[in-house]
Amino acid sequence: MFQVRIHGRGGQGVVTAAEMLSLAAFSEGHHSQAFPSFGSERTGAPVVAYCRIDDKEIRIREPITEPDALLIQDPTLLHQVDLFSGLRPQGYVLINTSHSFHELGLDDLYRDHRKDRLVTLPATEIAREHVGRPMPNAALLGGFAALSGQITLEAVATGIHGKFSPKIAAGNIAAATAAYGYVRQQMEELASA
Amino acid sequence: MLSQIEGSKAVADAIALCRPEVICAYPISPQTHIVEGLSALVKSGKLAGCEYVNVESEFAAMSVAIGASAAGARAYTATASQGLLYMVEAVYNASGLGLPIVMTVANRAIGSPINIWNDHTDTMSQRDCGWIQLYAETNQEAADLHIQAFKLAEELSLPVMVCMDGFILTHAYERVDMPNQEQVDAYLPAFEPRQVLDPAAPISIGAMVGPEAFTEVRFLAHHKQMQALDLIPEIATEFQEIFGRDSGGLVRPYRTEDAETVIVALGSVLGTIKDVVDERREAGEKIGVLGITSFRPFPMLAIRGVLRHAQRVIILEKALAIGLGGIVSDNVRNALSGITLKGNTVIAGLGGRAITKVSLHKLFDEARADRLERLVFLDMDYDLVQREIERTKQQRRSGSAAENILRDVGVVAARPA
């Protein structure tokens, strides 16, 4: 089972991101389970959503405490929430930011973790360009596909289509595609460094 | 067709396939997505021949359902928590009048303290209201149970409550094999009421009954509900023939054949328990789990049949009978009358506290070592409780327990100004 935890703030499409990811995984024949952390949702409040992916029925119903991947939609949460709690040693981390891990004050994580599992991605900027709104969720899923290889970019597009009207989906798919390319390039640079 | 779908949407679509004629509901978390989904289906014309009535309260929702059902319409509503309590007077009337209304309850805790998260306190409070109560383990089962519920309700002329865990199921996206209209039409015939209010042939229902006949009328309500013990397995078998799925029934045993320890539970937590059972089976422990799908009527014989060969039964329940302990436990013990085995009541998941595999393993380890008390509160912070008990001993006006505890756990909003 592959478990993804997504952190963000109310209004950033965190829950939708988990749902799109589950739709993407389903479209490739996997079992998948997406659910939000349940609370009194309000704009700006920290929000967590979860997605499990497996090749057999997923029966477990508890929140994900040991994620294989962390998607962080809002880096300002770094100082508010224990985002890396339970992260698996080989786990993937994708942060929506135009800063580096060093600039975010994450030197310890960067030193101790596999470098090819850590990526930053300016998802909000990419979304502004392709969606016209600062909604980083679709771009992050594109980046996640590139980083982890758990799902394809085509599946991400299917997931986006499942949640949005064709017109809005098109912009989000463009954002996911751009993010996919960005992360692939980062990983190639790392591999050849 | 296999769909990756939100639980609420799956239920709304399943209800629509049952061709309801009146839907009346008042939104309340975590039921909201279900009735929003149905309202959209009516508005768009996809659900034709159905009137969606926006009501001003849950009491009105159940009252409209009663009127609609009495007039011969297939009626549906949904609620949760405080909403269920608010409609209680009408809930009893619906069953007393023998009206086959189907209602979803998206299970949620009851205040005070107010809490929007999942447990079973709401529906457990209505266990004796005369409705049939079915509990869903997965979203697949939630969808399937609603289709079975209309058949069951209309055959017996009794209302059916389908209980599904709020948020955990209602807000979860997972794989559901959605039935199609042809299948549902083949399974569920048009509603032919056993009684109907018709201006062309006027009758009255809902008479006042005095001591001379009240006991007899109440006995008949019991007698009627007990018939569901035969009917529920029958309609589940018919369901399997048409839909190809084993869904519903009275109880669902899992790896109980040779089990020395059997866990009993209701609803979505069964999934997590099954994973734990598999892991412990691999380590050689003879352990199984019994899911109760039909809590009312209570399948006494089916439960007795599964548990009678066990050495220990652990009843894990998401509600607390204050002043007693466990509600499900009390019922299960009744089913085990005359059988001696070790029993534990575990109160778990209250107000949305996650029930984790780690905690369940610890719990079952304790049981195996015979160190488990008769009544256990899973993952409760005993120090926190003790501090508040001490405060109440030391000070007559020690303040509200809820606020004091929040302050102790460091929730910011609870700090004094």
Image (cartoon, coloured by chain):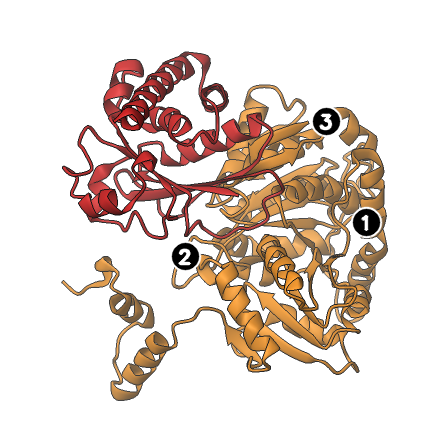
The quadrant the N terminus of chain B occupies is top right
Pointer 2 indicates a residue of which chain? B
Circle 2 sits in a helix, a strand or a loop, which is it?
Answer: loop
Q: Nearer the viewer, mark 2 or mark 3?
A: 3
Query: Type of residue at label 3?
Result: Asn
For marks 1 and 3, the one nearer the N-term is 1
Check disc 1 and report the residue beneath it.
Answer: B156
The relative height of residue B94 versus residue B295 in the rendered view (above or below) is above
Residue A54 appearing in the image: yes
What secondary structure is marked by label 3?
loop
**x then y, percent, for residue B88:** 57, 56
**Residue at (58%, 44%) from the top-left corner?**
A58
In front of the other: B259 or B104 = B259
Residue in the image at 80% along x and 36% along y: B244
Q: Which residue is mark 2?
A: B115
Q: Amino acid at mark 1?
A: Leu
